[in-house]
Amino acid sequence: SNCIMPDFKLTIGANWNGSSTNFKTWAPNKKVHIVQGDKETEMEPSDNGYLEKELLDANPNSKYKLKIDTGLTLPDPVSRFLPDGLSG
């Protein structure tokens, strides 16, 4: 039999739509900021423990990390590109 795989798209992580990037992560009961250089933007609660934020100044070449309210800064767990390795 011929198996045809449907188009697959991740809905979490950073998703560029051509003019802005929507960030989505799962962090129930946490505050999470998107860190771009010295700029931090707080993500907003969505549903089922997810947080989301749309940024106009982020694109596929933007470097960012996620900062949890404990102060811990991490790479996005579903990042598609880690040019600075696992710590970047």
Image (cartoon, helix red, strand yellow):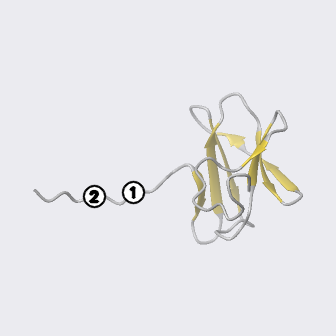
Looking at the image, residue 45 sits to the left or right of residue 4; the answer is right
Please report the residue visible at 64 percent of the width from the left and 62 percent of the height from the top: 21
Q: Which quarter of the rendered picture does the N terminus lie within?
A: bottom left
Q: Position of residue 84 (x, y in %)?
A: 72, 62
Please report the residue visible at 66 percent of the width from the left and 50 percent of the height from the top: 76
- Give the number of callouts: 2
Q: Which numbered tag is attached to residue 8?
A: 1
* Residue 73 position (above or below residue 70): below
Q: Position of residue 66 (x, y in %)?
A: 74, 47
Hey, which residue is sitting farthest right in the picture? 38
Looking at the image, residue 25 sits to the left or right of residue 2; the answer is right
Q: Quadrant of residue 72?
A: top right
Q: Which numbered tag is attached to residue 5?
A: 2
Residues tagged 1 and 2 counted as in contact (Cβ below 8 A): yes
Q: Position of residue 85 (x, y in %)?
A: 68, 58
Q: Position of residue 2 (x, y in %)?
A: 14, 59
* Residue 31 position (above or below residue 15): above
Asked which secondary structure carries label 2, the reply is loop
Q: Amino acid at mark 1?
A: Phe
Q: Which quarter of the rendered picture does the C terminus lie within?
A: bottom right
